[in-house]
Amino acid sequence: MIQLKRAYDAVNNDDGTRFLVERLWPRGVKKEDLRLGGWLKDVAPSAELRKWFSHDPEKWTEFQRRYFAELKERPEALEPILKAARKGRVTLIFSSHDAIHNNAVALKSYIASHTPSKAKRLSR
């Protein structure tokens, strides 16, 4: 199962393997406080796409299209997430204030729709 959580939310034992899926480190958060299985910068949107999107909900559909194109170009970046999901729960950590329109939401959707059916079941 893949779930989402803000970097500013408390760590929970039920989080499973936690991956930060941002290109930039969340402001004001100490590295040891996040208890990460990894910081996956390469799975995050490019700096150019992140700046273009600027968390504007009106750009959400186009952001997802562009982000999915980037992910398609680097499938190996997803491997740590997929490997951990085969073993148990995974939590994708994001820093955006908008819990609906952010790259972690898009990434979870991408994984669910672009991986074999077993991985789709894991992401629900």
Image (tube, grey):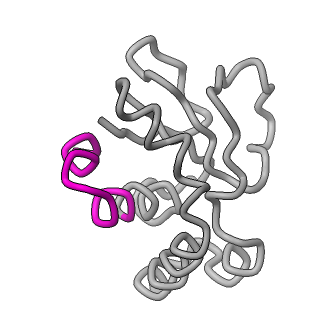
Relative to 78, residue 13 above or below = above
Residue drawn where x is 43% and y is 64% of the image: 106
Residue 72 in percent (x, y) is at: 51, 74
Q: How many marks?
A: 0
Q: Quadrant of residue 110?
A: bottom left
Which residue is outermost to the top? 13
Residue 51 in percent (x, y) is at: 73, 77
Residue drawn where x is 29% and y is 35% of the image: 1
Relative to 12, residue 28 above or below = below
Q: Quadrant of residue 90?
A: top left
Q: Is residue 118 left or right of residue 44?
A: left
Range of the magenta residues? 110-124
Q: Quadrant of the C terminus?
A: top left
Q: Main secondary structure of the magenta part?
A: helix
Q: Is residue 5 left or right of residue 20?
A: left
Q: Quadrant of residue 53?
A: bottom right
Residue drawn where x is 61% and y is 67% of the image: 74
